[in-house]
Each structure stands twice: as structure tokens, then as C-alpha cells.
Image (cartoon, helix red, strand yellow):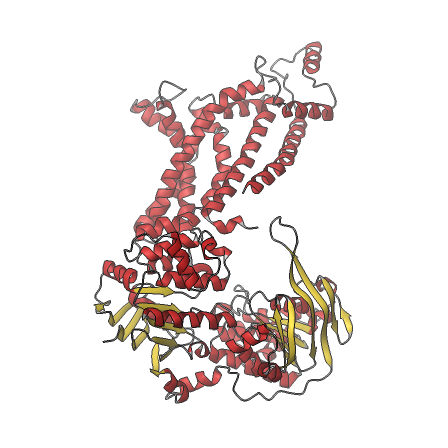
């Protein structure tokens, strides 16, 4: 008998059926992964049977011989406290902000009725999940820890009461690439150590590939296909799965065909960015230190690094939306002044695109106003009719139809919103786009489409791209060269394929290994 | 923590100074003076009084004198209650106002937080809507309506409570405290409900629920504290106002608190008395905002940074 078995699960919220006909099993000591894009119902599938989503589940859900479908509120709570541990996506918010790490861990260890653990035992739990200075951390509040550290605390708390089933809902999506691999390896170890069954949810095929025994592919609330991971990846039966596999960037796929770059366009010479420390503390935070990068006309440069490496700060400095403390940014050899001194022609040259497409569009505006906004500022001489016409053109360039112009951002999907953001960036005919994690928040299928769109824009208009990301495999699909950042410094740069094949700096090696 | 307190107290001094100076000069801009009565005094007496209290000197010199005395803890003499110094008047009125205001804050917190908590747990249901409606009514009813209404009902009709003055025991406090606490409790109920309802939707509540904790424990251990941040930021300045004399309530119930002196001082152009009360009030506001900041740090440790 399986540890956990779901048969014919359906989930309804407010009378709407969002998941149906999903069946899966989790064996003790093994990992079953649910893969799907946003809106596929994967999270609902794993949380609703335990009463942790607003939905109502029907069907058969049997965990360790207990039928969750017929369990009342009290029994369900009992099952959660004894049998399951949960790890959620957002380590920033999933821990209670006003309770110390130690007190939350203690609560977790006692949730199944165990006696109060000693401080030493709590520290050991933290050490087991790879946290250093464990004793000190017991007294810290969660916000003092980094994202990766918090996720380790979440994991320690999720297994502190020795559950039989670990449910991990996108446990690594909010972390950067090298941390992802470490957390997944940790979960594997713990699973083997405690004979834990694991139900893993992810939108990213690449991140579960080496870890899941069984794969369940979901789309639009339904099961697409399921089976052994290896079988599905090597011989996918369904078209959706095939597209998903093709969309997932890998380092071993054939190198892309990219255009020939022209003359140097943008250079940063010894650029540094410093921020004053928050509060009244003295000293400076050096976010970017002596950065030298160069982008040619029609070239794509990947700026890669972990979180906090300074890559976004450098990108913002180049786009003229963040400060430059020292050094110089040059455009075709001539110095480009600081953001306030740039004239309209200079501002037009470089346009940014951000990570979270929905958050970067003003919810009060119509798409047409959003897309044509740069024109109002950069080309004040244009009349309204011309602006509308150019907005229509820009929409066509990003493969959206005209009728999107009258819609509001709230009605767009993530991919559509990112296309609108790109349309806004290209409408004023820039020569360089600064793309800050522009595909990281998107599902793989949608992200791959955006990458294709960027390639096409480059081929059509000779655009240069600064592609800021933590994902080397995604960057490899569109970039000629790569520059790796760590702690504010460029630690390695060169032709994409050469750097991937022979990474020299440890930071590069970690990022490549994680992809 | 200690650094924060020291720093805030250091910035409090110039703030206070600016408030005192501004009030000093603004008050002198207003027409009239402390010795204007129904019948004008004869010019000689007027001049003598002016000279005795130093009101004939240049304005900046008077301001300087006032502040240098204030530093030594001397609020100066009252110009209207001529047998008393301002310090004495404050010493008479402040204990009454402090008792009244302090009890009102405690009562308002007890009613407000409890009501807000109930409403948030039953968000969207009938109980929530009823409580929120009552809270709106409580906030909207001014004390000059509730005060007399309470006095009429419990004092005159039922004869249960004294309607005026500070009598024996604590019975005289009940009605003024209730009248003072009602609007504050309404505001606290609304803030608590809004704060808690949004905290209960947050991820860490789901984590607590995933642990199979009982709902009561989730509510009190994981939910309530961050939900009270808006209450703390409201209560900081509000407490200073309540403690330094609720003018209306003190007048309605005939209580010799600080509020009465403040109003009479302003009407009579009793410069030192008004300045004394203003200084006290400003100092309390600064102090209570500091308390509020310290409480934030306890309610939500993320607020201790930066």
C-alpha cells in the first residue's frame, strides 16, 4: 500500500471546479513531483486535501490508512500535526515574524505531542539542515536570516516532529540557482534518512529532474500524464509534456544560432555603486565594485549572479534608473551622464524590462496608455493619433493583437503582461534593452516564448540586450557572452559557450553546476 | 534599543524648543492680554502689572527668560490665578487627568481589541458586521453627547452614579472614563479588525495551520501581535491627548483636571499657564510616540531595523 494515495481528486472554490480527475501516489522514501504552470491546479492538489487552501476537495485521499476525505476538522488537524510536514514557496513570509527561530522550531518539534526539546536538540536540528552558528540562530528573528537560511529553517521545522509525508510547494522557486540545487540535495538526503515520502510541487521541470521518482504533469486543473520521471522525460506521451520539455532550457542542448554583433555600443568603466547603510549606522554598502562590461551593437550579454551579487544594481545604473557613485558609463565611446543629466535622446537609447510583469504595470491604466507612455515623455512632439498608431505597431511586434490595447493589466496573464512591458520598452525605438530577470517569474513555456520574442526583436531591429538572470541555461539560449557577478564584482566574463564549458571562478562553477 | 531611546530623547529637546517658541509667539499675536477684563483697569495699574510680570520687556527677552526658567523646572506664575504658580496648578489637575485618561485607555483597549478580534475571526459574517457597525457608532458619537446622556440616565434617572465632581471611592470615575473610552474603543476595534484580518491571510498563518495547531493558538501566538501595529501607532498620540485632559468630559462631569485649566488659560490669555500645559502635552506626545516605536519593535521585530 502506498503511503499517500489520491484518487479522482476534484477541488472546487466558490462553486468553480479548478481541479478534476487527478490521481497520484507517494511511496515512503520516494518523491513524487507535480509539474505545471500557473493555474494548473498543482498547489491546490497538494494543499486542499489537508484543509490548507480555500478549496473543497472531493475524491479519495488516503494518507497512511486515514481517509482525509471523510475526516472532520479535528481529525484533519490531527493528521497535519502528526503525519505531515510542509515547506512553502516564500521563505520570507512563511515564518512568523515576531517569534524567534528557536521558538518556532520548538513549536514544530512539539506539534505531534513530543516533550519539549532541549536547546541543544534544537541547535542540532538546525545543524542538520546545514545552518552554521546554530545556537546563535535560535535566538534570531526570521528576518535576520537570508532567503536560503530561512528555507532551511522551514525544512528543519517541517521534519522536526518526524512526519511520514513531506509536502514541498515550490520550495526553491524563490531562491537563486545555486541555492536551489543545495536545498533540493538537502531534501533528498533527509528523505532517505527518515524514509519520508515527499510530494514536491514545481513549475520548473529542470529543478525536479534529478530528484523525483514519479512525475505528474498537470495543466489547467487536469492531469496530463504521470509515470516514472525518466520515462516521461525521455519518452513523453503527450504533446503538452513534449512542449514543456522543449521549453525548459538545458546546458546540453544545441547552441542557439545568434546574429553577428557589430561595433561596441555600451561600456561601463570602473563603475561603482554605493549605498549608505540603513538607519544610523555608518559606512557604505558597496553594491557594485569596479565593474567593467561592454555590449556590442546587436549583441546579448548575460549578467549572471546569485541574489545580492549586485547584478540588478549594475543593470539599473546602466538603464539610468539607479545611481552611479564612481566610474563612467560610455555610449559609443562618449560618456553617458548620470540619470538626471541625460537628455531625451539619451534616455531613449536604453529601456528597462523588469522581473514581475504584473507589478511593473500600473493597474489603473489601460494597456494603450502604458505602452505609449514612453512616447509622451521621450517624444513630446508627437500627436495623439501617431502615438496610438505606434502603440498598435508595438503590440504587433510583441505578438499581441490590437484589442489588448483597451484592456487593463489585471486582465492579462503573466506572459501577456511581460509582452506589454516589452512593447512599452521597444516603442521608443531603443538600442539597448536591460532585462532584469525578465523571464524568471514566468512558467517555462511562457518564458521560452519570451526568449524567442527577444531573439526575434534582436534579429529584426538589431537590438542589444543586457540579460540579467541567475539562470545560466536560460541565458545561454539568447546570449553571445556572459559576465558573472559575485559580491558586487565581475569575477569572470567571456564567450557564453567557452565559460560554460570551462568555468574558472568558483561562483561561475556553482552557477553552471546548478543549471 | 538603548541607542534608539537616547537618540530619540536627544532629538526631542530641539523639537520641544520649537514647539514652545512657536506657541509663545503665536499666543502673543492673538489680540487681548491677561489683564483685560469687563472693566478696563486704569493705565497705572495695568502698567504696574505688566512690569511685575515682565510683560513690558521685548518679546525675545521674555521668551528667553521663560525658557531659561523652564530649564530649571519653573513654569512661572499664573497671571489669572494669582495665588498659584503654573506648576501648582498642573500638580492639582494632572493626577485627575492622568487617572481618567489612563483608565480610559485601558478600558478602550480591552473593549476595542476584544471586539476587533471577534470581528476579524468572523470576517464577513453577521457578527463582524454588527461589531463594526457598533464601532462606527462609538467612534462617531462625540463625548459631549455621550457624557450628558450617561449622566442623565445613570446619574439622574437611576441615581446610581454621581454626576459631578470627585466624590468618595471610585464611583465618580465610571461615567467619565466610559464616555472618554467609547470613541477610542471604536477606533481600536476597527484597527484591530483590519490588522488581524490581513495578518490572518498571510503565509505564516498557513504555516502555523499546517502544524495542526488549535485555532486559538494560531490567533493569539501567531496572529495578534503584528495585527496590533496600527493600534500602537494610533494610540501613541491619542494617549497623550487623553492623559492631558479631556476638556469636554472634564467640563461635563465637573472634574478639576488639566483640560479645564488649558481652556480657561487660553481664554484668559494666561500665557504661562497655556505654555505650561502645551509644553507638558508636547513632551507627552513625544514620549508616547517613543513608547509606540518601542512597542512596534516588540509587535513586529522587522520594524527594529532601519
In this orientation, which residue lies closer to the viewer: A15 or B142?
A15
**Count of marks, rendered view:** 0
In this orientation, which residue lies closer to the viewer: B181 or B164?
B181
* Residue extending farthest right: A334
Estimate the x, y position of residue B100 in percent, counting from the top left: 43, 28
Can you see residue A361? yes
In this orientation, which residue lies closer to the viewer: A156 or B248?
A156
Task: Say left or right for B36 vs A269.
Answer: left
Estimate the x, y position of residue A118 in percent, counting from the top left: 36, 52
Estimate the x, y position of residue A416 in percent, counting from the top left: 51, 75
Residue A405: image quadrant is bottom right
Q: Is residue A211 placed above or below B60 in the rendered structure?
A: below
Q: Is residue A404 placed above or below A154 in the rendered structure?
A: below
Estimate the x, y position of residue A313 in percent, counting from the top left: 63, 65
Q: Is residue B249 placed above or below A113 in the rendered structure?
A: above
Q: Is residue A105 placed above or below B179 in the rendered structure?
A: below
Q: Considering the image in quadrants, where does the N terminus of chain A appear?
A: bottom left
* Image point (42%, 24%), residue name: B253
Residue A66: image quadrant is bottom left
Task: Say left or right for A257 vs A129.
Answer: right
Amino acid at each position: 500500500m502506498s503511503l499517500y494515495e489520491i484518487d479522482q481528486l476534484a477541488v472546487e472554490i466558490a462553486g468553480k471546479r479548478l481541479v478534476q480527475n487527478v490521481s497520484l501516489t507517494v511511496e515512503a522514501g520516494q518523491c513524487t513531483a507535480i509539474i505545471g504552470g500557473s493555474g494548473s491546479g498543482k498547489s491546490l492538489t497538494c494543499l486542499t486535501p489537508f484543509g490548507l487552501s480555500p478549496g473543497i476537495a472531493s475524491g479519495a485521499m488516503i494518507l497512511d490508512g486515514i481517509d482525509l476525505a471523510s475526516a472532520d476538522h479535528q481529525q484533519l488537524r490531527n493528521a497535519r500535526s502528526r503525519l505531515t510536514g510542509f515547506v512553502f514557496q516564500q521563505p520570507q513570509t512563511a515564518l512568523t515574524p515576531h517569534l524567534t527561530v528557536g521558538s518556532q522550531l520548538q513549536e514544530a518539534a512539539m506539534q505531534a505531542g513530543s516533550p519539549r526539546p532541549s536547546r541543544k536538540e534544537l541547535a542540532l536540528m538546525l545543524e542538520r539542515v546545514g545552518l552554521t552558528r546554530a545556537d546563535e540562530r535560535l535566538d534570531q528573528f526570521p528576518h535576520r536570516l537570508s532567503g536560503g537560511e530561512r528555507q532551511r529553517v522551514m525544512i528543519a521545522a517541517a521534519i522536526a516532529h518526524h512526519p511520514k509525508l513531506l509536502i514541498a510547494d515550490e520550495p526553491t522557486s524563490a531562491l537563486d540557482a545555486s541555492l536551489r540545487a543545495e536545498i533540493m540535495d538537502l531534501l533528498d538526503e533527509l528523505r532517505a534518512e527518515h524514509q519520508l515520502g515527499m510530494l514536491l510541487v514545481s513549475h520548473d521541470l529542470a529543478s525536479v529532474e534529478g530528484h523525483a521518482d514519479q512525475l505528474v504533469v498537470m495543466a489547467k486543473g487536469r492531469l496530463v500524464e504521470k509515470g516514472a520521471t525518466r520515462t516521461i522525460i525521455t519518452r513523453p506521451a503527450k504533446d503538452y509534456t513534449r512542449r514543456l520539455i522543449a521549453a525548459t532550457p538545458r546546458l546540453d542542448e544545441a547552441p542557439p544560432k545568434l546574429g553577428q554583433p557589430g561595433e561596441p555600443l555600451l561600456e561601463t568603466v570602473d563603475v561603482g555603486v554605493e549605498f549608505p547603510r540603513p538607519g544610523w549606522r555608518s559606512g557604505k554598502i558597496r553594491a557594485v565594485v569596479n565593474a567593467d562590461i561592454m555590449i556590442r551593437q546587436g549583441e546579448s550579454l548575460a549578467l549572471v549572479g546569485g541574489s545580492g551579487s549586485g547584478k540588478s544594481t549594475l543593470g539599473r545604473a546602466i538603464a539610468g534608473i539607479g545611481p552611479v557613485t564612481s566610474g563612467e558609463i560610455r555610449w559609443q565611446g562618449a560618456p553617458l551622464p548620470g540619470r538626471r543629466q541625460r537628455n531625451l535622446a539619451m534616455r531613449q537609447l536604453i529601456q528597462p524590462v523588469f522581473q514581475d510583469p504584473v507589478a511593473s504595470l500600473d493597474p489603473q491604466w489601460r494597456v494603450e496608455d502604458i505602452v505609449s507612455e514612453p512616447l509622451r515623455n521621450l517624444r513630446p512632439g508627437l500627436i495623439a493619433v501617431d502615438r496610438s498608431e505606434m502603440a498598435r505597431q508595438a503590440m504587433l511586434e510583441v505578438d499581441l493583437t490590437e484589442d489588448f490595447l483597451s484592456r487593463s493589466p489585471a486582465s492579462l496573464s503573466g506572459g501577456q503582461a511581460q509582452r506589454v512591458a516589452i512593447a512599452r520598452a521597444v516603442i521608443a525605438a531603443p538600442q539597448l534593452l536591460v532585462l532584469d530577470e525578465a523571464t524568471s517569474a514566468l512558467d517555462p513555456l511562457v518564458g521560452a516564448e519570451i526568449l524567442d520574442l527577444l531573439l526575434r526583436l534582436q534579429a529584426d531591429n538589431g537590438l542589444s540586450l543586457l540579460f540579467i538572470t541567475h539562470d545560466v541555461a536560460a541565458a545561454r539560449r539568447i546570449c553571445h557572452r556572459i559576465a558573472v557577478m559575485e559580491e558586487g564584482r565581475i569575477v569572470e566574463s567571456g564567450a557564453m559557450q567557452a565559460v560554460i564549458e570551462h568555468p574558472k571562478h568558483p561562483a561561475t562553477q556553482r552557477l553552471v553546476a546548478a543549471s | 534599543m538603548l541607542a534608539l531611546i537616547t537618540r530619540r530623547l536627544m532629538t526631542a529637546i530641539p523639537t520641544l524648543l520649537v514647539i514652545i517658541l512657536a506657541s509663545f509667539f503665536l499666543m502673543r499675536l492673538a489680540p487681548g492680554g491677561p489683564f483685560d477684563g469687563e472693566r478696563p483697569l486704569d493705565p497705572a495699574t495695568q502698567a504696574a502689572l505688566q512690569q511685575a510680570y515682565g510683560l513690558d520687556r521685548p518679546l525675545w527677552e521674555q521668551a528667553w527668560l521663560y525658557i531659561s526658567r523652564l530649564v530649571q523646572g519653573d513654569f512661572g506664575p499664573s497671571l489669572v490665578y494669582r495665588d498659584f504658580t503654573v506648576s501648582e496648578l498642573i500638580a492639582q489637575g494632572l493626577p485627575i487627568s492622568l487617572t481618567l485618561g489612563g483608565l480610559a485607555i485601558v478600558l478602550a483597549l480591552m473593549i476595542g481589541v476584544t471586539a476587533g478580534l471577534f470581528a476579524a475571526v468572523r470576517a464577513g459574517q453577521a457578527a463582524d458586521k454588527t461589531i463594526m457597525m457598533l464601532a462606527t457608532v462609538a467612534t462617531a458619537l462625540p463625548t459631549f453627547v455621550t457624557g450628558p446622556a450617561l449622566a442623565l440616565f445613570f446619574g439622574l434617572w437611576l441615581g446610581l452614579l454621581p454626576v459631578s465632581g470627585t466624590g468618595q471611592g471610585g464611583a465618580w470615575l465610571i461615567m467619565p472614563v466610559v464616555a472618554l473610552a467609547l470613541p477610542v474603543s471604536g477606533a481600536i476595534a476597527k484597527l484591530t479588525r483590519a490588522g488581524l484580518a490581513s495578518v490572518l491571510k498571510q503565509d505564516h498563518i498557513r504555516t502555523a495551520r499546517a502544524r495542526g495547531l488549535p485555532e486559538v493558538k494560531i490567533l493569539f501566538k501567531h496572529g495578534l501581535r503584528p495585527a496590533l501595529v496600527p493600534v500602537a501607532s494610533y494610540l501613541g498620540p491619542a494617549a497623550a491627548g487623553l492623559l492631558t485632559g479631556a476638556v469636554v468630559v472634564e467640563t461635563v462631569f465637573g472634574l478639576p483636571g488639566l483640560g479645564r485649566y488649558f481652556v480657561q488659560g487660553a481664554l484668559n490669555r494666561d500665557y504661562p499657564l497655556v505654555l505650561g500645559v502645551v509644553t507638558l502635552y508636547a513632551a507627552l506626545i513625544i514620549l508616547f510616540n517613543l513608547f509606540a516605536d518601542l512597542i512596534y519593535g516588540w509587535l513586529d521585530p522587522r520594524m527594529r531595523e532601519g
